[in-house]
Amino acid sequence: MFDTIAVVGATGNVGRIILDLLEAREFPARRVKFLASKRSAGKTVRFRGEEHPVETLCPGSFDGVELAIGSTPDEVARDFVPWAVERGCVVIDESGYWRMDPQVPLVIPEVNPDAVDSHQGIISSPNCSTTQMVLALKPLHDAGRVRRVVVSTYQATSGAGLAASQELENATHMKLHGQEHKPEQFAHPIAFNLIPQIGSAKHEGYTSEEMKMVHETHKILGDDTIAICPTCIRVPVTNCHSESILVETERKVTVDEARKLFAAMPGVVVVDDLPAKSYPMPKTCDNRDEVFIGRIREDLSSPNGLAFWCVSDNLRKGAATNAVQIAELLAGKMAAAK
């Protein structure tokens, strides 16, 4: 059991879910510290039936803290993570800042749990769109070796923060009432629209979000020979990311085999009955911790191709749940070592 842990970004969307998960899953910690920026000074959070004050994040916040889970912007993680590590604290970081550092393991517990053993004080949790895709790719890669992936993501506004989801709701209301709405959180109107850009322009016409999916997948699966072509799209859905994925494998994986592989994969749920109109949708996957897969079918254009549809709650498995699972993995290893 940990004596003291900390949640950094405790007042944010993901931070609040982390607290709910720590409580619901009875995480083994005697004391929890709640940390956030100066803007959250004076706020309280509810945990284990009581209201707790939120402390302002500073270097001294990590004195005596053994484990921290952080959900903050990159620039905040850049600063606070070294403060914590210098004081002997292990940090599970949700930001993108440390993910591609060769000294930092990038972990999905169902996929590469042993990677945590190499940590030097920092463990990164992947980008939400990467997490659900890699969880789906893992059993196919083990069975038939994935050679190529073409993925199109349909990403909810919650991935851009609370204000972005509020903008979708407000803009939709105004549009339905014949009023104009000027976008603030997005470059273009999001209501009744699709925006085929998430992140900044990066590599040969690809965005930063798209390149995250390429580099993070290579790192997690330990195979940079997998060819990946991603397109990331923001859609007018409040929560849950969806992905259309086409996979080519070295050895042919049939639909029946793939369905069995997915069903046996921890953290994956198969919902796949097209005649019954049963398949994953954001509305039915919201507030769930699993990755849902359906529309499994052979690729008509490639002999070793397999196409499927994948949906997951980006705030939970795509962020909070994965981080808490990493913490549970560390707790289990600590208990086993005693």
Image: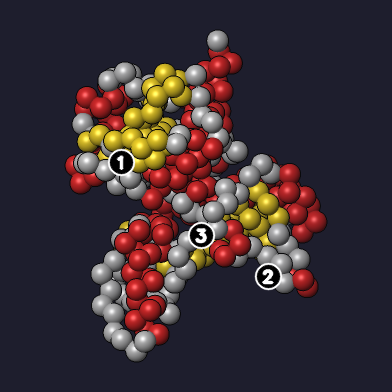
- Is 273 located above or below residue 337 in the figure? below
Picture coordinates of residue 72, whole percent (x, y):
32, 44
Task: Please give the residue where the numbered disc 1 appears in the rendered image.
Answer: 44
- Looking at the picture, tell me which residue is in the foreground, 113 or 61: 61
Q: Secondary structure at mark 1?
A: strand
Disc 3 or disc 1, which is closer to the eye? 1
User: Residue at the location (45% across, 34% down)?
Assistant: 48
Q: Name which residue type carries label 2.
A: Ser
Q: How is the image coloured?
A: secondary structure
Q: Count residues near mark 2 (Cα–Cα under 10 Å), then give few for <14, some for 14-19, many for 20+.
A: few
Judged from this view, the residue extending furthest toward the front is 50
- Looking at the picture, tell me which residue is in the foreground, 123 or 292: 292
Q: CA distance from mark 1 to mark 2?
A: 55 Å
Residue contact between numbered discs 1 and 2, judged by CB atoms under 8 Å: no
Task: Work out whether residue 124 can be spotted.
Answer: no
Picture coordinates of residue 56, whole percent (x, y):
22, 36
> Is residue 20 left or right of 36 when viewed as pictured?
right
Judged from this view, the residue extending furthest toward the right is 256
Q: Name which residue type carries label 3.
A: Cys
Q: Secondary structure at mark 3?
A: loop
Q: Which quadrant of the view contains residue 284?
A: bottom right
Task: Work out whether residue 256 can be spotted.
Answer: yes
> Is residue 292 left or right of 182 when viewed as pictured?
right
Task: Please give the residue where the numbered disc 3 appears in the rendered image.
Answer: 240
Q: Residue 301 has which mark? A: 2
Judged from this view, the residue extending furthest toward the bottom is 178
